[in-house]
Amino acid sequence: MKTKYIVFTGGVLSGLGKGVTAATVGFFFSDQYKVVPIKLDGYLNSDPGTMNPIEHGEVFVLDDGFEVDMDFGHYERFLDINAVKDQSITMGKIFREIQKRERTGDYLGKTVQLIPHVTDLIQEEIQNVSNKTKSQLTLIEVGGTVGDIENELFIEALRQLQKKVGEENMIFVHITYVPIPFGVSEQKTKPTQQSLSLLQKKGIWPNFIVARCPEFLTESSKRKISLFGNIPQTKIYTAPDIDCIYKLPEVFSAQQFIDSISKELKLKKGSTEKLKTWNKILTKKSDKTVNVLIAGKYTDLEDSYASIVESLKHCGFNLNAKINITFVDTEKDFDMEALKTTDAIIVPGGFGKRGIQGKINTIKYARENKIPYLGICYGLQLAVIEYARNKCGINDANSLEIDTQSKNHVVSLLDEQKNVVMKGGTMRLGSYKAYLTDGIIKSVYKKLGVGKENKNVLEIHERHRHRFEVNPKYTDILKENGLKITGTSETGLVEFIELNKKDHPYFTATQAHPELKSRLEQPAPLFYGLISSALKSKYL
Ligand code: GLN
């Protein structure tokens, strides 16, 4: 079968949910076809790995260790796939390749230009990914909004690609916004009309419009968009504001949007098997509430911790509990009061010294007051520092990352990192094996059916993103004072720690980022354990 392509462009403003829309369309076809999402990002960074999450949202890490846009989280969760690095195409990557080719002499005698050289390379990369992955349906999300200078070349390349592969094999879905301004109580279609005309001027006539709107589009709004946008009314759909993204498949299916896509591309009808499974999970009653506190420093933007939030939601749905998340900025005046009403505490991944003392105080509070705790990456390193200071009597215990002068670096640089100078893509990244020995952590992985057991040791795989590690010189003293190291890597790195069940109901931490692999149908074990334990403490 020839690869079919669906391109998703955005209009009016960013943040409308293009990624979730693309993932939802793919959701219906991934049972019957090999569906491969590609994200095009117009920035000149090679990848988002060096960007501040407050600007760009969470940095998602793939199994192969590539750092990518957070939309890949939606793709993996909706399509139940593990993406690979080539699926993320940034303008930074494209320009670097162009320069390399020019220096190699690939363009000898030619003037290297944005068109055709850059636009050709973009098409080549898209088709290479499709061929390599044997994609039958490639979803292409164009980052940003039509009209941004950054994505002009992508849009032009896609216009050309459609000519190459044929209109019957490649369609465009334009996602726009229909606001209802305060005090007007009327759906306003003008921004959508303008963004459509912008796209059409670039030679692209979208096959479908998906309008994000606080409510379903009225017939009159559809009529106006249809008239000005020159697109049949039957090809205009709504993405209404919803409280939970996992409900979007149901919303699209009910509007027959998925059927229209099948018809347009001559694909088999979208499968509804997965929809049934999701609906079963989503309609479970939640009669209990768990208050979870996340103590971090990127709390201004919820997207900074997107996968953690999703993992908690997955647990909530599967354990019949409503999850209330409170973000606490540990850099600002730290309000210990917030801790008193919380049922579970997470210290997530992070970098640098800002807000550290607040995080350590939070961990101490969780440990001493027996509040279920999950430390993720930095949350493990800081739990070790807290334990070393307050339980092992090493008062100046610290991480090399926080205080280079400390005499007791209980967290230090990984050996392989000692000579690293380049910052981009050089952390310990991607999926690594860990071996779990008896304890709370191993039992929760086993309970959820994750891992392979051999001679009482459970082998599991989680994704990573860090430079520092627990200093092996201190593991004995930590253990002597009651900290259990129940998971190590193949090379002996500390990967999982916990406290004895008799001392604390659920005190766990990992050097990995288990949130990156959590799915609605298969929540990440450590999160599941956290919420189960919180429910037990609160309701039993
Ligand atoms: N800053 C720590 C390190 O580099 C932790 C990283 C993280 O939490 N992702 O090791």
Image (tube, rainbow, N blue to C red):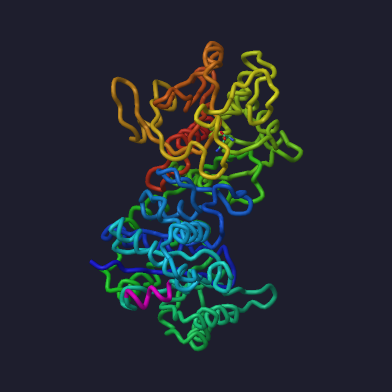
Q: Does residue 338 appear in the picture of this structure?
A: yes
Quarter where residue 157 is shown:
bottom left
Does 423 sit above or below residue 108?
above
How many dots with numbers?
0
Residue 110 x/y as whole percent: 46, 71
Q: Quadrant of the N terminus?
A: bottom left
- Picture layout, residue 195 above or below residue 338: below
Tell me which segment is drawn in magenta.
158-165
Residue 540 in view (yes/no): no
Q: What percent of the width, then of the height, locates residue 420?
A: 55, 35
Magenta stretch: helix, strand or loop mostly: helix
Q: Nearer the viewer, residue 238 or 173?
A: 173
- Who is closer to the viewer here, 459 or 155? 155
Ligand 1 falls in which quarter?
Answer: top right
Q: Examine the structure image and report whether residue 221 is included in the region drawn in magenta.
A: no
**Left or right, 407 with reference to 521:** right
